[in-house]
Amino acid sequence: MTMRATLGKRFKNPRAQHGFQGRTCSIISVGSYVPDRVLTNGELEKMVDTSDEWIITRTGIKERRIAADDEFTSDMAARAAMRAMQNGGVTPDQIDLIIVATITPDMPFPATACLVQHKLGARRAAAFDMEAACSGFIYALEIGQQFIMSRTYNTVLVIGAEKLSSIVDWKDRNTCVLFGDGAGAAILQHRPDAHGLLTACMGAEGDKAELLCMPGGGSRCPATPDSLAAGLHFLRMDGKETFKNAVTAMYTAGAEALRRCELDISQIKCVIPHQANRQIIDAVGERLGVKPDQVFVNLERYGNTSAASVAIALDEAVQQGKIQRGDLVLLVVFGAGLTWAAAVIEW
Ligand code: ACO
């Protein structure tokens, strides 16, 4: 008997096709952390030639959080993870695998996930990082769910964490107003009688990699005095082209995820989009036919926190009671790569 038959007929579970024998995978709890330091648009007015009015009108962002000098991606990731573990009643020794999605690891290697493993005391856990920029959290959820579905592991900790303030050029008004720091975490386990992560559509368009990148610091351009002087170790972005691609990719991913589950957008309780720009969120929402009260937005307080963005938003939506068990949730993201992804979850 298919899972759809045993677990209800509100929607189709795409994973339950083709004689599927795996276990369903649910997010049993979430948690998030943002640093205390608030950087307002007013403060940015004193740093670059910009205005509160320009930033709010073009992006919707009012303020963002900035990590302390001695606070790193692994610290924020561990704090978010501890909150998720507390919310789910999960102890460090239960964790089988830690996946950290980030473009701002503490160091190029070892993986930030290993540093998080040590900070949590999760000694049994395997640990690795994965990088799909702002799409990283959904990519990591999908990877984590594969381990639960295949019965390889029972408990997977997925984290999106970023210290973007460490790669932003604070003299470049085109980018510095957009980004912030923070982390969000989710614990994945099998929950009987729940479909959990129904589907995740993921994709990439590598031919557009140059639109948003950090040119220096890798094998192509190792750090030298010249690369530093040329500012190659800062994030660079073609904002206009990125914007256009973001709207198309997020809409396409969201629509495909709904199609796979035979769902209409009206059945979705909460849409959680990547928190990059209010105009992108509105344009995607309009194309998907979303009602304003279906969309969760917190970017006015945090800006774009890349891989942490939907993870933090998901935690806040749960904390605020906007998502209850059994509700259907659509996550939809877009990032450098260019990468994109959308996931449908039965919460
Ligand atoms: N303050 C004041 N003026 C500014 C600022 C600023 N902070 N930034 C740019 N401007 C100026 C530009 O220099 C330009 O001036 P000019 O006409 O004299 O040349 C003017 O404003 C218009 O610039 P545009 O780039 O056309 O502005 P636009 O309306 O496109 O908004 C923005 C720019 C907000 C960056 C927008 O394009 C955007 O949000 N793009 C998507 C960015 C994004 O989401 N990136 C993250 C992807 S996810 C990841 O993986 C990290």
Image (cartoon, rainbow, N blue to C red):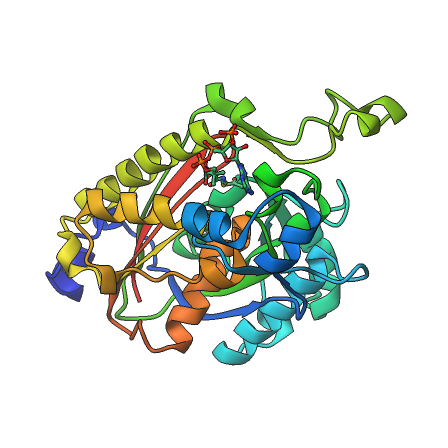
Above-or-below relation of 16 to 86 = above
List x then y, in percent, for residue 15.
Answer: 27, 48
State the residue in front, 162 or 147.
162
Compared across the picture, whether 251 is left or right of 9 comes to: right
Residue 301 appearing in the image: yes
Which quadrant of the view contains residue 131?
top right
List x then y, in percent, for residue 307.
Answer: 53, 50
Quadrant housing the C terminus: bottom left
Which quadrant of the view contains residue 190?
bottom left
Q: Residue at point 53% right, 63% down?
A: 185
Above-or-below relation of 282 to 293 = above
List x then y, in percent, for residue 189.
Answer: 43, 66
State the residue in front, 336 or 40.
40
Q: Residue at point 60% right, 30% down?
A: 213
Compared across the picture, whether 233 is left or right of 252 comes to: right
List x then y, in percent, for residue 157.
Answer: 54, 61
State the residue in front, 57 or 317.
57
User: What is the total number of numbered labels drawn onto the structure image?
Assistant: 0
Compared across the picture, whether 338 is left or right of 324 comes to: right
Above-or-below relation of 118 to 105 = below
Compared across the picture, whether 98 is left or right of 280 comes to: right
Q: Residue at point 38% right, 69% down?
A: 317
Quadrant housing the N terminus: bottom left
Above-or-below relation of 308 to 333 = below
